[in-house]
Amino acid sequence: MQNQEYQEQIDMPALTVGVEEKLPPLRNVLYGLQHVFVSNVWLDPIFVAAMIGLPVALAANMVNAIFIAAGLVTLTQATRLARLPIVQGPSAAFDTLMINAGKANSLPAAGGSIMLSAIIVFILAVTGVLDRLRSLFTKAVTGSVIIAVGIALSGFTLFEFLGGSQGMSSFLSPQILAISIPTALSVTCLSLFGKGYLRTYAFLIALVIGDIIAAGLGQIHLSAIADKAWFGLPSLLPYGALTLDGTTFVTFFIGYIVAVIEAMGVYHAASEMTNITLDSKRIRNGFAGEAVGSMVSTLIGGFPTTAYAQNVGLLRLTGVGSRFTVMVAGGIFLVLGFIPKAGALLAVTPDAVVGGIFLPAAVSLIYTGLSTLGSMKKTEANYMIAGFSILLSVSLPNAVKGVTGHIGDFLSNGIMIGASTAILLQLLLVMIPGWIKKTNQQKPVSN
């Protein structure tokens, strides 16, 4: 009994600030800023726009659209809908899909596919169908998906942390590592050994340390801020009228379902960490809000928003679980969306600093998934679900490099692979055998 209590004690997150706890304004703003920096909401649209080769005006519009959609959904989720400390942002599951659609001049079809997918998910949410499917999202599934997301994020994070990839002149540059390593160590040490404000402001302190080092090494360039406007509004349907293409829709709908699975895992992790029951109302409201946010984002040139797992990792590291700090983060996103100059100021943070503060968040995300798997039922089926989904999410994208088209989009996406594998195996190994067993037990015994 004593060992069991000790195990529960080390598995439970030590939140020092509860969900409904209101903090002084300054502390709220500072904690909200940490959520903004850890979320890196602006990086996905910048990356997607750059890979597509969008003109400057359309690229800026995409970034503004994402900020506005993320701000609106984060605010409404924290205040009225799920009422959990969850930050919303663009789903990484759509990065490759959007890039390939953009390169094929199919952004209107991508937008139409996202819109229809969001409408379907909205209907499934408000009618309670998603809640009734919750039996699919066991701890084996959600834990595996959270780990898959963490692993996928780690690839991007290490790219920033190490200064790119092999063959690039900045890769493993002493100047880059002199920024990223102290930044990551600052977050890690303050989160583990810091007390009081040193722990709760670990990410902001590390950000300042990283920026000071970067400034000393000449890695902060403020010239980009001068070119940005003080006020801007995103354009309505900037890529043209939405269209529908069957093949494109199927690909994006699969991506959307993967984002739903990812978000369900985030909701479960956040509710367990904050000791709040994830009831039907929170699920219904949360996914309805995400769907509406994705519709709005699509109309103004963005792409779908989803619950961000890395910000749940921030809750664990800082011990601050107040949803009011998340409201502040939502407000900051809106400011960044309508004031491009403010967004540009955020974006001048060097990649090495971003990698340094993001790496511990990705690590936290992975051990949040491990903690979830640790509390699942210890059955052979669950072991297979977790093992296969994690293994394939890591190894399959590398094994199928060179595969093109929509199949290539799917197979190269570790999050899609991990989530799809987990759900498929949950059906094949657990649910269908359970239904068959239940049916056989209900059959009358013949004399």
Image: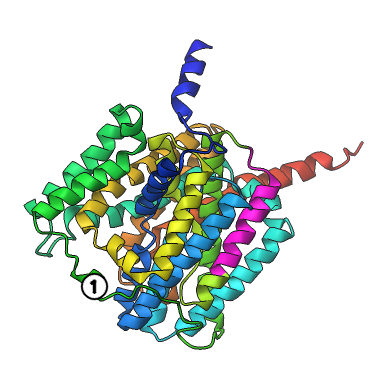
The answer to whether residue 400 shows anywhere in this view is no
Q: Residue furthest top?
A: 2
Q: At 35% from the left edge and 61% from the top edge, which residue is drawn?
A: 397
Magenta span of residues: 277-294
Could you tell whether 239 is left or right of 361 in the image?
A: right
Height in image: 323 above or below 293?
Answer: above
The 10 Å Cα crowd at callout 1, few under 14, some 14 to 19, many 20 or more, is few
Q: At 80% from the left edge and 39% from the top edge, which residue is drawn?
A: 441
Residue 319 on image: x %, y %: 43, 34
Residue 103 on image: x %, y %: 36, 82
Residue on which the image places disc 1:
226
Residues 11 and 70: in front is 70
The answer to whether residue 127 shows anywhere in this view is yes
Magenta span includes 283: yes
Q: Residue furthest right?
A: 447
Q: At 29% from the left edge and 74% from the top edge, which residue is drawn?
A: 228
